[in-house]
Structures are given as C-alpha cells and as structure tokens.
Amino acid sequence: MLRKNRLFTPGPTPLLPSAQAAMAAFTAHHRTADFRNLFQRVLADMKEFVGTRNEVLVMACSGTGAMEAAVSNLTSPGEKVLVLSAGKFGERWTGLTKAFNCKVEVLSAPYGETFSLNDIRAKLTPEVGAVFVQATESSTGARHDAQGIAKLVRDRGDDTLLVVDAITGLGTTHLDVDGWGIDFLIGGSQKALMIPPGLGYCAVSDRAWQRMEATKSPRFYFDLRKERKSAAKGETASTPATSLFAALGAALEFIRGMGNGDLAKGREALVDNAELCAEMTRAGVEALGLKLFTSSPGAALTAICSPPGVDSGKIIKEFRESFDAVVANGQGEMKGQLFRIAHIGYYDYLDTIGILGALEHVVARVTGKAVQYGTAVRAAQQVYAREVAGKRQLVNA
Ligand SMILES: *Cc1c(COP(=O)(O)O)cnc(C)c1O
C-alpha cells in the first residue's frame, strides 16, 4: 500500500503547510524594514501565544539553547538551585546547572511519576535561588503541577525564581504565566508551533530581568540583556533565523484563525485540541488492553507500556515499515519498554483515528495474538462523540 510519511513524535511535529510556504518564499535581509516589521509582529504575537505581558525573546537555537540561557543568565557559580527531575528532560536541567557550577539539589520522582508538593516545599530553603522544572516531561508523558509548584515558589517571595521548560507544555497545557508567577518560561519551534526545529524562545519576568543584573555565570551568545536591547530596535544581536521567523509568523496567523481572529482564544483552542486528541488516544489504547505509562498524563503525548515480553523497538519498527508512521521509543532507561505517540500542534481527529487504527494492526503483528479490529478506534470515537454532543448541548442551552 502507498504510505505517507507522518510524524507522531513529541518534536519535531507535523509541519503547517502555510508556514512551509512562508518559509520558502522569504528572502529579506535581516537589517531591513521588511524583516523588522515581521520580527516585531512575531514578538508581539508570541506574547499573546504564550499568554504573558512579560517580554518574549526568540533565539536561533534548539529548545536546549533556551534552557542554557535560563541557567547562564539567572544563576551564579556556587549558588544553590533546586532541580525537579522525573525523566530525561529533568536530567537535562541537572546537567546544565552542574555545567554552570551551581550547587544543585535534585528532587527526583521515578520515571512516569510526578512530584509531591510537600516534598518540594521541604526542599525550598531560603538559599535556593532558582527552581527548574518541566511543565510536561516529554520522555514519560507526565504533566507536572506547574500551578502548584509556582504557588510554593511565590510563597517564598521574590528571592526564588521559577524556570519552567514548557517546550512541549506550551500549546498543550493551559498555563497562566503571569497569574501563577512563572519567571522564565521556555518553548521551542518544533513542538506546538508547527514549524521546523531551530528557534528557542523564552518569556522573562521583571524579577528575572533584575536577577540578571547581579548573576555571574559566563554568557555571550545567550546574553539576554544584549538580546533585549536589540529586540527593542526590531533586531537581534546576531543573524536571526530569518526564514523560521517567516514560518513562525504564518503559524501564529493560523492559530489566530483557530480563535476566529483572537490569538489568545486560538491558543486555548489549540490546547483543547491536544487535550481531546490525547483523551481519545488514551481511551483507544486502554480499550486495546495496553497500559499507560504515567498516572498523570498530559496532552502533549501519550506514553504507552509495551505489551509484556515485547521490546517497544519492534513496535516502532512495525509502525515505520507498515505505515511509514514515526512513533517515538522510550528514552534513556525506558528504551525498549514504552512507546510514545504525540498530539502536539498540527494534529487532528483523522491523525488520532489513523494512528489508533494502525496500532491495532501493529499490536496484532508484534504479539501474534488476535485483535478485535475497531476496538481502539471505537473507544476513541466514543470520546469524540461525547465531547461533540456536550458542546452542542452547551450551544443549545
Ligand atoms: C524537545 C524537548 C526539549 C529539547 O529541545 P531541543 O529542541 O531538542 O533542544 C527539552 N525539553 C522538553 C520537555 C522537550 O520536549
């Protein structure tokens, strides 16, 4: 059968056609009025997309670059920081803060789990200068309680900053950056913004800007004070990824369209879309008798335990060979034990139903056991039908 190559991975994600076209067409030099106009419009729109009044900066780097910018701008060598780690990306915070010689306290939860707020409270001593966490841990599919964590940090006053890696959280999780008091929120272009990898962005609070004046970690490319000064003039400190800015502009327009002309509403609609796709996926997977890997699943992705005795690598391979569908394996110590289906960004009903239909064939193949075809698909359709019926009732009421 003909097979279309499709990504079901938690980054990169499926590309928005209008963004690809905008990118291919863009040729302006970056020190021109044309680029400045685009740049300023994109930065203003990014604030609405993130849902913040804080300044948003967009840099030419992957998400990890923006994570490094958080550490290098907000900490000093020898300073105590608290890392909340429950997976591969939590471990990245540990690696980064150690690389910048912070005194790192790690509160870890096992892969697949999330943190107890009481444990966090106990670790939040007055010396802790900053707390680092993920909104959603993409290696396990778990969503952390960013609101609850923010409340604990804000209760400590202005001396502790909260840094949230929302690289897969943005666009899949309702986040109130200003209301909760998140000081540094990080995103990446290849996730919910539906464009290729290459841009990292961050929303920076006043508290965080003030902290940067006193911190002593080395920084140059990611010196955010320098970047902020340039941005005020409609420029970046070094050459920006111009074509990706064009793509980002088109993606933000698309999301605005989802909100009927209101970008903030479009963001909410994008999150609701991911939530519904995730709920359909969970229902389908469980109806097939498979187990979810985490008990606190987010809407970015669904992590699924491999059937007993089956290496998840076989599932990944079968998806690829039979359907040209790219599904993610477990990462790190979870490799071979789980597989991950993402529903981030440009991802819809038909994608959801399609991957569940394919999953039925894949499970039959790798387990050698009979599968009642339609089981996963039907469970997902029932979730969708309930959701649509509920909306109609609201409209009629
Ligand atoms: C994808 C991802 C990253 C890493 O981003 P890169 O763009 O690969 O550097 C970091 N954190 C989370 C939660 C992610 O999903």
Image: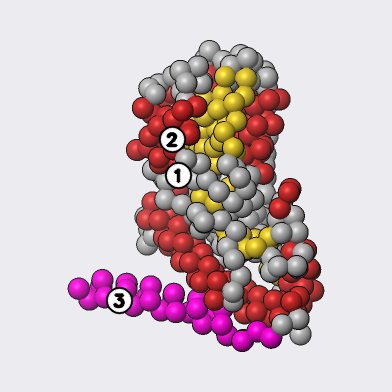
Q: Distance between the residues labelled 2 and 1?
A: 12 Å
- Asked whether the beta carbons under mark 1 and mark 3 sit within 8 Å of each other, the answer is no
- Residue type at tag 1: Asp
Tag of residue 145:
1
Q: Could you tell me residue 75's position as x and y percent?
A: 58, 20
Q: Nearer the viewer, mark 2 or mark 1?
A: 2
Q: Residue pushed farthest front? A: 308
* Residue drawn where x is 40% and y is 40% of the image: 148
Range covered by the magenta-colored residues: 370-397
* Residue drawn where x is 69% and y is 86% of the image: 370
Evaluate whether residue 186 shows in this view. no
Q: Residue pushed farthest left? A: 397
Quadrant containing the N terminus in the rendered view? bottom right
**Residue designated by label 2:** 118
Q: Is 381 one of the magenta-colored residues?
A: yes
Q: Could you tell me residue 360's position as x and y percent?
A: 65, 79
Tag of residue 392:
3
The residue carrying mark 1 has its beta carbon less than 8 Å from ligand 1: no
Q: Nearer the viewer, mark 3 or mark 2?
A: 2
Quadrant containing the C terminus in the rendered view? bottom left
